[in-house]
Image: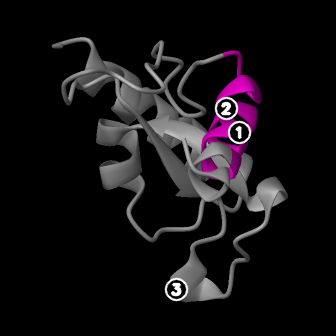
Amino acid sequence: MSPIKEREHRKRVEIYNKTGGRCYFCGRELEINPLYPTDNEMTIDHLIPRSKGGSNKYANKVPACKYCNNLKSNRMITDKLSYKIFISYAYEETLVF
């Protein structure tokens, strides 16, 4: 593996470990490098979206399943009520998987 790919993989593992390998939003167990694309494949979400001025730094990145990342899109979850509504909706939707 090239040094650049190795560094990128290390960064992904650090983000994955932030939540113990679970989606930051719904808690679904994630796969960091599945052999085939899956619903549990880890994506990286920016808590404050880049399109809204968020940084690309470690503190602004969290692991998320594809479903929650797509559901959140470029929205900002700024307060506890918004977070609870988002989580309950995401959780209900993930029960069908």
Q: Which residue is mark 1?
A: 10
Instruction: Look at 42% across and 26% down and name the residue there.
Output: 33
Tell me the CA gap for discs 1 and 3. Answer: 25 Å
Is 5 situated left or right of 65 in this image? right
Dot 1 lies on which element?
helix
Q: Nearer the viewer, residue 53 or 37?
A: 37
> Disc number at residue 33?
none
Residue segment shown in magenta: 7-20
**Nearer the observer, disc 2 or disc 1?**
1
Instruction: Look at 33% across and 21% down and name the residue there.
Output: 34
Q: Is residue 51 magenta?
A: no
- Mark 3 crowdedness (10 Å alpha carbons): few <14, some 14-19, many ≥20: few
In this view, 45 is above or below 50:
above
Q: Residue furthest front?
A: 2
Instruction: Give x and y (percent) for residue 58.
Output: 79, 56
| Earlier residue among tags 1 and 3 | 1
Quadrant of the image for the C terminus? top left
Tell me the CA gap for discs 2 and 1. Answer: 5 Å
